Image: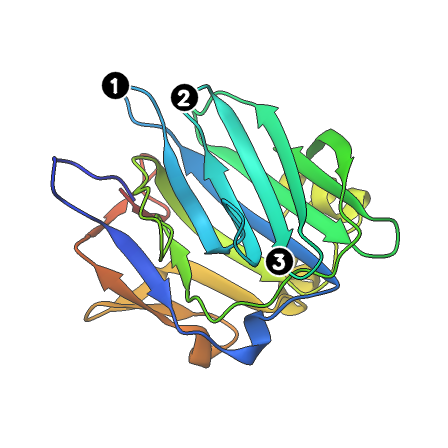
Amino acid sequence: FRNTSIGQYSYIEIPDRDELDLESSITIQGWLKGPDNGVTFGRLINKGGDWWQNGYSINYSTDGTLHFELFNSTTNEHGWLRYGVKLSNWTRFTATWDHIDGYMKLFINGELVSSNTTFSGPIGLTKQKLNFGRSATRGGYANASISQIKIWDYALPNSAIKNSFDKSNDLLDGNALAIWDFNLNNDGVLFCKNNPSLSGTLNNINLLKSESGNDMIMS
């Protein structure tokens, strides 16, 4: 989604449910595009995780870096992977982490671009609700367009991430914990394709057709 004017606070909020308490491994994937004019910024996908809060998050900084963060307040461990990427065009990101090897990885359009950060884990648990477009506790409303968010409760292998960018993979999607297909929305609700209990509420936003006309986006 995108904030289109000052004072317009737009976001999607997903209920806090046990399925989203991911401690030992995670994959987060989605599509992003910056505004046509101005600098991209904001909290994109947040269930805690940013600024020393238990949980996990994906954020974008005004310095042009995409951030993948994990945090555990008991061990005081902060995993923070950053990578510079322009969002002038639609870009698919995939962030993965697994406790076995400990590496946080970031993929852009199917290609591994960074894996130089480790996190021992586990990911700290939080009662914060998962939000798209802001942090539930810190705001940081994003001005980027967002679409087709997916989460797995395991780290996707490199080959699956690359191959699924080149060609959709129904089996891979079938194994996902949650897929928020932005085409599936009605009366202020964004439906979770494979787990209805994780359907979210639309707040102060309208979902729009993408430039291609094929997908709905938060903008």
Please, what secondary structure does the residue beneath circle 2 have? loop
Vertical position of residue 85 compared to residue 120: above or below: above
Q: Residue at label 3? A: 73
Lateral position of residue 34 relative to residue 116, left or right: left
Earlier along the polypeptide chain: callout 1 or callout 3? 1
Give the image location of residue 21, x and y in percent. Answer: 60, 71
Three-letter amino acid code at disc 2? Answer: Ser
- Measured in 3D between alpha carbons, the distance from the residue under mark 1 to the one under mark 3, in whole angstroms, is 38 Å
Please, what secondary structure does the residue beneath circle 1 have? loop
Q: Please rate how many residues cluster around mark 2, counting C-alpha atoms within 10 Å: few if below 14, some from 14 to 19, many from 20.
A: few
Residue 37: give its label. 1
Looking at the picture, tell me which residue is in the foreground, 132 or 183: 132
Report the number of numbered marks: 3
The C terminus, quarter of image: top left
Please, what secondary structure does the residue beneath circle 3 have? loop
Earlier along the polypeptide chain: callout 2 or callout 1? 1
Residue 15: give its label. none
Numbered disc in front, either 1 or 3: 3
Vertical position of residue 178 compared to residue 118: above or below: below
Earlier along the polypeptide chain: callout 2 or callout 3? 3
Q: Do the CB atoms of the residues marked 2 and 3 lie less than 8 Å apart? A: no
Residue at 45% x, 33% y is 60
Q: Residue at label 2? A: 88
Lateral position of residue 133 relative to residue 100, left or right: left
Three-letter amino acid code at disc 1? Answer: Asn
Q: Please rate how many residues cluster around mark 3, counting C-alpha atoms within 10 Å: few if below 14, some from 14 to 19, many from 20.
A: some
